[in-house]
Amino acid sequence: MSGMLTLGQLSPEEVRKEIIHTFEAGQHAYVHLSLFGIDISITKAVAFLWIGAAVTFLILFIGTRMLKDRPGAYQVIVEEIYGFGRNSLAGQMGDEGRKFFPYTLSLFIFLLVLNLIGLIPNSYPVTASITFTLGLAMLTFFISQYVGIRRNGLGGYVKAFVPPGLPLKIVFVPFMFFIEWISELSKPLTLAMRLYANILAGHLLIFIFLSFILYFGTYMAIISVPMALVLYAFEIFVAVLQAYIFAILTQVYIEIALYRQEH
Amino acid sequence: MLDPTGIFDFISTSLLFWEVITFAILLFLLYRYAFPPIREQIDKRQREIEGAIDEAQKTREEARELLAEYRRQIEEARGEGRRILEDARKQADAQRERTKKEARDEGDRIIQRARDEIGRERESAIREVRSEVAGMVIQASEQVLGRTVDHDEHERLVAQALDDLEAEVAGSSTGRGTA
């Protein structure tokens, strides 16, 4: 009875701290490091980033260690993952884009693993960090600009931003160029925001529902726990979906840049 | 670090720094150690499957040719059998005809022999009857005359009379077959 009262007696400020505890804990540095004055400490977030990368590598690497002519279940899964990258992610606009599918496939598995690891209690959802998602989105942006310029030439690539046949060229050409570049620059931002916001919102919702127990008392568990469970299950779906969206949009952006002149 | 709560941790230099390095290493490792063997394995199996399909097609082709060959052979054998049967039938027919003919000939020969025999028997019977008749006529004449008659003379007379009678019978019964 007293425990119930204690739970119900948390102040809003304390409840808020409980909700954002996971994200605060991500900032906790295990090892303080600094490079030219820039903080590169190994935080909890960095640790889970490494765990995710290691799991990603091991999933595929273990698969390659047991390749047989007559595949077992695990080999089929690994080959299916590979086939998914080769056949479903790649070649959205043309066959030339296919050579980028190992990159997008790696991205997909990496993000999926990080999303799912983030769902384990007391872990840290690395993909719920805007720094992380924006970093990958900028990588997508730079790669797409690079392949676009390399294939179309710098002049051809820049010119292709303006659609042909515009009236009143002196006004509309710079205008369209400006508009198109805003659109181009918004791509990595939306890419980063989509993943970050989806994962973060999912986690916050679960924590908020559970925090009702802290704020209103134990009887709220009747509502909070089922809701948190439903949201948790939904988060598993979101984890797969958002990883897929991020990967396939990366592939599409790269291929759009590749075929800039044709479209 | 602008946001101490960590919810909008923009920009966390440590995370960004380690992210770039980690992702670069991850990509390198995957490109180097994970993807090539998987691709090779998939391609290898694809080649094997294609090979197996080609092999199966070839085998099926062969089987079809073999079947056609066997069918042809069976057809030939059947034709051969029919021909042999035909020959045998013909031979049997010829044999039967020959046998029949032989039997007929044999029969004819037997009949001929029997006829000859009958003819000979008849001749001898007639001769016997004649001598019997002649003897009886002489005996009767001796009793009528009451004396012995010249046996040779009588016999000659009787023979002549019989010849005449015979000639008469033959003359009256011409057209009624042979005598």
Image (cartoon, coloured by chain):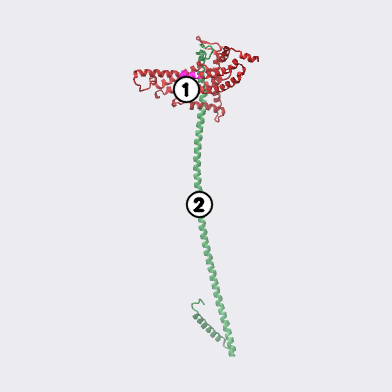
Chain colours: A red, B green
Q: Is A6 covered by the magenta stretch?
A: no
Tell me the quadrant of the picture where the C terminus of chain A can be found: top left
Give, as a three-letter code, the residue at label 1: Leu
Task: State the residue position of label 1.
Answer: A249
**With A187 as the anchor, is B127 left or right in this view?**
right
Q: Secondary structure at mark 1?
A: helix
**With A252 as the anchor, is A125 left or right in this view?**
right
Q: Nearer the viewer, residue B119 or B86?
A: B86
In x, y percent, where is residue B150?
Answer: 56, 88
In x, y percent, where is residue B11?
Answer: 50, 13
Tell me the quadrant of the picture where the N terminus of chain A can be found: top right
- Examine the image and state in which quarter residue A205 appears: top right
Q: Which residues are magenta?
A: A187-195
Q: Is A191 covered by the magenta stretch?
A: yes
Q: Is residue A139 visible?
A: no
**A101 vs A11: above or below:** below
Q: How many marks?
A: 2
Give, as a three-letter code, the residue at label 2: Glu
**B114 vs A110: above or below:** below
**A102 vs B99: above or below:** above
**B144 vs A62: above or below:** below
Q: Nearer the viewer, residue A238 or B35?
A: A238
Q: Which mark is residue B80?
A: 2
- Examine the image and state in which quarter residue A218 appears: top right
Q: Nearer the viewer, residue B67 or B23?
A: B23
